[in-house]
Amino acid sequence: MMAKVEATIVGIVSKILVSIGEEIQKGQEVIVLESMKMLIPVESAIAGKVTAVHVKESDFVNEGEVLIELEELV
Amino acid sequence: MSELTDKSKRLQNGGHPKYHQKLAEQGKLFARERLALLLDENSFVEDGLLANSLEEGLPADGVITGIGKINGMTVCVMANDSTVKAGSWGKRTVEKIIRIQETAEKLKAPLFYLVDSAGARITDQLEMFPGRRGAGRIFYNQVKLSGVIPQICLLFGPSAAGGAYIPAFCDVVIMVDKNASMYLGSPRMAEMVIGQKVSLEQMGGARMHCSISGCGDFLAKDEADAILIAQTYFSYFQTPVQVDYCISPIADKISELIPHEQNVPFDMKEVIGALVDKDSILELKELFAPELITMFARLKGKTIGIIANQSKTKGGVLFGDSADKAARFITLCDAYQIPLLFLVDVPGFMIGTQVERAGIIRHGAKMIAAMAEATVPKISVIVRKAYGAGLYAMAGPAFEPDCCIALPTAQIAVMGPEAAVNAVYHNQIQALNPEDRDSFIQMKRKAYQEDIHIYRLASELIVDVMVEPEDLRNELAKRYDLYSEKQVNFSKRKHPIYPV
């Protein structure tokens, strides 16, 4: 099943911690956003394999915007 | 068997066995079993068992009311019996609920609402809906009792339409996952009236209310869990725990948990865990607006209410929902004499079009007003940064905390050095050659850091005391003890114009 990791807050993409094809754990930090001068890690709610990364560093994102797509690992 | 005994036994069995069967299939308990779990053994006395008993099929008119004890303390209860006409309200149902509210007021006893009801019995509407002692009086009484006696709602099933206001007016709402729901209009009604097709869980399920709407405080995994949560919650209103049990084996580890860089997230819950008595935490609204933590805990046996910024989630920034959550919790603690502890690590209130349109200013004002009005012992601890209106909302020095404590990592300012230098020197920076900008910015930031250094603020008496993190637990316990006799009335006016 496909799943999405969305921005939890409006801000700038500070760091992308994963790449396409990488397997990640549930709760793993996948992106760090910067907002209100704070570093805000975004975690994946599920374990999965990264199928798409929709942002690059320094991009502006709105809350709820899709950052990463995953294929859920069963 | 005498006629009365026989009749009482039948009435105590509730509705038709097929409805009991349905309960079991849904993982639900019979209302009387719920009460047996909640109350001390053999402590319950019941009023109105024979209500509407001349009618067939309406034992106790669908609600059980009475008085009992929890941990030896007197409490009043009402429990909908969903085996009787789906727990719907008739004339006597409403009268029984009103009477137990009146009893609770007279006894100054907490009132537990065990809700599982389809709402008004439409066939009886003239008798139970519009009049002086109609259902509206239940809500009127709830509002009147709010802050006088604890009102605790356990939601086991639906709480529909007007009935949804019972939880809304309670201090706290415990919802059973999958079974509990609250909604003004059912999915069926929504499809008819506004053409929306949606499931009950999406419309008003327990998880939605506990994580998105904020109407629920606790998501219980089943009914026994919900009852345990209610008992645990209530224990914070009872006598202090024996001091022998009140230890924190890791109070000296706090400094290791707090990063010195202001923008690096950490888990404030670990700091709280080290600060308060072992296993003494009960978090309210854990799933809702988690960037702000609200919890009861014990400090050397005594209950305190904690409001803390969680930098791990959304940077600990205050949003409309987090401000609402804080306002509500502060009001709850202040009403029942529970001392407040603010653990401050806040970058400020969120900015941007989205939050402005959602009214962040008026939501923030609610939090600031509730905090300002709170007259219980109130301590703010500046753990790390306290920027902008965030300082005010978290019981900053101007808002009459009994003391403002700073840890060595504290930083108080209108805004952080990065934002401040950019705001003040923007034009100058732009006028510089690009290669000179960085060193200019670094120099100005350093000067700004020195200007707002915490020792400077302590020297100016902006904070009252500075403490090492490992001494914080003892410092707080001593101070709460010394402030415990505090008697302050915020105002003699009728009430403020609430910024809602």
Image (cartoon, helix red, strand yellow):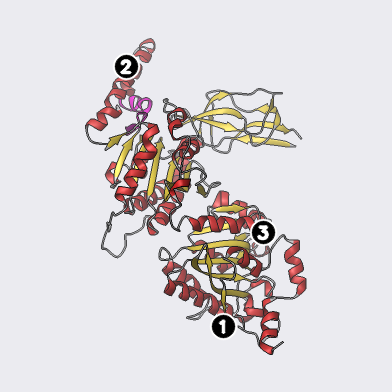
The answer to which of marks 2 and 3 sits earlier in the sequence is: 3
Dot 1 amino acid type: Glu
Dot 2 amino acid type: Met
Secondary structure beneath dot 1 equals: helix
Q: Which residue is mark 3?
A: B179
| Quadrant for the N terminus of chain A in the image | top right
List x then y, in percent, for residue B50. 62, 83
Q: Which residues are magenta?
A: B408-424
- Which class describes the residues within 10 Å of circle 3: few (<14), some (14-19), or many (20+)? many
Tell me, yes or no, whether dots 2 and 1 are on the same chain: yes
Mark 2 to mark 3: distance in Å?
60 Å
The quarter holding residue A50 reads top right
Nearer the observer, A59 or B407: B407
Question: For residue B419: magenta?
Answer: yes
Mark 1 to mark 3: distance in Å?
30 Å
Q: Which residue is mark 1?
A: B127
List x then y, in percent, for residue A48. 71, 31
- Asked if labels 1 and 2 touch by Cβ distance under 8 angstroms, the answer is no
Looking at the rendered image, the disc whose residue lies closer to the viewer, 1 or 3, is 3
Q: Which mark is residue B443?
A: 2
Chain of the residue under label 2: B
Give the residue at x 30% y 46%: B401
Give the residue at x 39% y 12%: B434
Secondary structure beneath dot 3 equals: loop
Chain of the residue under label 3: B
| Quadrant for the C terminus of chain A in the image | top right
Residue B184 in view of the camera: no
